[in-house]
Amino acid sequence: MSSRSRSAELYERALEILPGGVSRNTVLRKPHPLYADYAKGCRVTDIEGVERIDFANNMASLIHGHANPEVVHAVTEQLSRGTAFTLATEVEIRYAEHIVGRNDGFDKIRFVNSGTEAVMGMLKAARAFTGRHKIAKIEGSYHGLYDYAEISQTADPSNWGLDASPEAVPVAFGTPPAVLADVVVIPFNDPERAIAILEKHKGQLAGIIVDPLPHRVGLIPASAEFVSALREWATNDGSLLLFDEVITFRSEYGGAQEWYDVHPDLTAMGKMIGGGFPVGAIAGRAEVMDVMNPLAETVLFPHSGTFSANPVTMTAGLVTMELYDRDAVARVNSLAERAVEGINRAIEGTGASACVTGGGSMFRVHMKDHPPRNYREAFATPEESRRLHLLLDHLFDAGFIMINTCSATTSTAMGEAEVDALVEAMSEGLKKVRTSSLQGGHKTSASED
Ligand SMILES: Cc1ncc(COP(=O)(O)O)c(C=O)c1O
């Protein structure tokens, strides 16, 4: 793209006033981000007039694609009636009833404004309920910006420690040492090692937070064996099992937790349940949720938020989730399955060193011969990163927006034609990657372990 493009000009202005020129690092691209003009369904047009098929869906937050007519209609009506009041609204109750009705394990729910806030609220609720302050989390998993939830999310071979006892590695400079001391890091899908670590903190943990399909850990589903082991250990210990379903609630009608025989005590949600607007929610067992009950004699966890449950988000969320019925869930999941099958065929056909992981309506391409089993295996070497970026650039130029880890989500706004087009572009991209590796891409320096 010419340096005189409108996007380039806008970015020059942005650099003057926004650190790095953006408010969210996710939209950064080199040499500059592209700026959206408008979008409809599964297609986004940037301000240069280029249209692309959107497999990122604002980081897995748009289940019906862009500008769904029913959502637009309902929200427009609500906008003209007011956007935020210091009064409760009926739509909050209707939406709460809808979400709670989707999952037997949800007795009560509270709405907040982001996934970060939902996770933070969930962890604080667990502490208030148990009277304990430590939490356990899976190495590498992303749960948003809360200090405790982000520990180890960017751990690398230089600091992650032994397989059997992962280090608590801070993300932000200045993270209080007390936070590191209160976060216990466990390896993914390794019940034996995880339980051995948890045992050392018996009686001290408020909860164990688990994303059932953690994106940064490799987008591999948590095994039933792993989840059951954590459930059993937490129950015996008096700590809580906490699910982060900010992304994965899309996977089944009542969330990815339907994959397991056991229930978490609390679940954090966000992204798609806002129907395109900022949202978060905490739901679960009444007894635990009641730590937020302002009518209690002693309120264990006072909880509030100026824009929580605002009627615009509640309206968009309710319409979106009513449209996301069991048939719609099955349809987006089968589109993702079709994509994974097609990409696997492309990998085989091109002989590229790549693999694909995923679950529900999400999938992720790795530049590795075998699907990784945990964060350490999913961690990309510099050579794998180089190849991945080559593939991502190819896909972008071919008209596809992916999540920057080469992950993708399907939406109800797309069909088999869009999925097949992505597979076709992926096949061409993998050929390019393979040729580049044969021609001089340097050898990967073994595994990062
Ligand atoms: C699993 C998970 N939890 C929490 C969050 C944080 O959500 P938000 O960006 O809305 O704060 C994210 C965001 O990507 C996420 O993927």
Image (tube, helix red, strand yellow):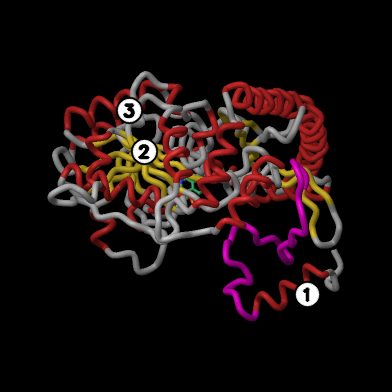
Question: What residue is rendered at 51% in x and 40% in y?
Answer: 247
Taking the magenta stretch, the answer to whether it contains residue 126 is no
Task: Give percent across and percent down for residue 396.
Answer: 77, 49
Task: Give the residue number, with chain letter if any, for mark 3.
Answer: 191
Question: What residue is rendered at 81% in x and 46% in y?
Answer: 399
Task: Give percent across and percent down for residue 101.
Answer: 43, 28
Which amino acid lies under the numbered mark 3 shown in the image of this protein?
Pro
Which amino acid lies under the numbered mark 1 shown in the image of this protein?
Glu
The answer to which of 177 and 17 lies nearer the viewer is 17
Which amino acid lies under the numbered mark 2 shown in the image of this protein?
Ala
Task: Give percent across and percent down for residue 29.
Answer: 69, 60
Q: Which residues are magenta?
A: 16-43
Tell me, for residue 283, which label it has, or none: 2
Label 2, residues with CA under 10 Å away: few <14, some 14-19, many ≥20: many
- Look at the numbered disc 3 and give the secondary structure of its residue: helix
Task: Give the residue number, with chain letter if any, for mark 1.
Answer: 9
Image vertical order of residue 147 relative to residue 115, above or below: below
Which label sits in the foreground, 2 or 3?
A: 2
Left or right: where does residue 383 sit relative to residue 372? right
State yes or no: discs 2 and 3 in contact (Cβ < 8 Å).
Answer: no
For the N terminus, the image quarter is bottom right
Left or right: where does residue 265 sit relative to residue 410? left
Question: What residue is rendered at 49% in x and 59% in y?
Answer: 84
What is the quadrant of residue 126 in the picture?
A: top left
Q: Which residue in the rendered view is the most extreme toward the bottom? A: 16
Taking the magenta stretch, the answer to whether it contains residue 37 is yes
